[in-house]
Image (cartoon, helix red, strand yellow):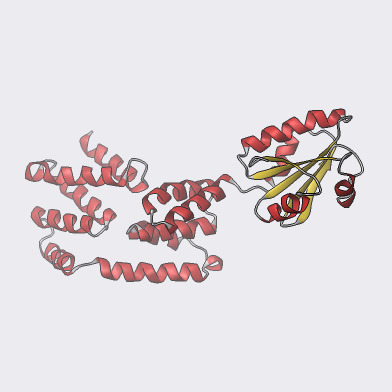
Amino acid sequence: MNDYVVDIDQGNAQQMLIDESMKRLVVVDFWAEWCSHCKTLTPVLERLAGEYGGQFLLAKVNAEEQQMIAGQLGVRSLPTVILIKDGQPVDGFTGAQPESAVREVLDKYLPKPWDLDLQSARELMSGGDYSSALPLLRQAHTSAGGQIDITLTLADCLLQSNRMDEAEELLAEVRMADQDEYYKTLMARLELQKQSAKSPEIEALESELERNPDDKAIQLQLAVQYSQNGMHAEALELLLKLLRGDMNYQDGAAKKLFLDMLATLGKADPLAIKYQRRYYTLLY
């Protein structure tokens, strides 16, 4: 046996057909040497098993040699394919089918690409690797069109990465019907993080800037504090305002901080993309 294909007999039927179906979809292919249609269908199934990378197990049963297994599953003609999930037959077909039809049946029961991304991201998050999980979750969120479990996991990852502004925007879009305990926990964490994010230094600088809104030195100091406290959107917005008035303020210190922040966020980051575009409008 490899991860994709196994030959079934009485010795491994329970393990491979029932136990394995508790972990992933099992596709049972009943065939025989004399069956010409089997010789057309089986290679298609084997190729798909490899292509899907072990998302399902192809369990091949020689119906002539394993008549008891074929009888137990009600096989009356060949080829017959039966899909087993969680210990129970859930679907199947008889006769040779085109590859497109086989894919259509499989795709009803196999995880979608975004579900695999979600699973990988959760594993990364459990190990504390939020920076690697974040692009996977962004991709999954886009592909799945806002599937709620992906949305909430992305918000969780953003909070863990101290990206409160994005997390808040994402959570604001969650429908009332989807506001479960996980959502409420994330909202509570968001509020706590927002309260703790503003250090006394930030509050003092914000008050000073309110009194002196055109003071570039205060703007730069506050942008530095925002950046150090993970308030990326606030820092970038303030720096952009400063650069709009003086692109080379303090011998380019403001511009350097702005570009360093974009580089730290990464080219694919939505916030970086947004402010990169706005920066280009200043240049051109």
Q: Is residue 284 above or below residue 122?
A: above
At horizontal 43% and vertical 56% (from top left) the residue drawn is 125
Q: Position of residue 54 (x, y in %)?
A: 62, 42
Q: Residue at x 47, y 54 (%)?
A: 123
Q: Residue at x 49, y 68 (%)?
A: 182
Left or right, 81 with respect to 113, comes to: right
Q: Quadrant of residue 202?
A: bottom left
Locate the N terminus by quadrant: top right
Residue 264: percent from the left, percent from the top? 27, 46
Residue at (36, 67) in percent of width and height: 190
Q: Is residue 47 left or right of residue 28?
A: left
Would residue 89 appear left or right of 106 to someone viewing this image? right
Q: Position of residue 82 (x, y in %)?
A: 80, 46
Q: Is residue 98 visible?
A: no
User: Which image quarter is the C terminus in?
Assistant: top left
Where is 106 relative to 184, above or below?
above
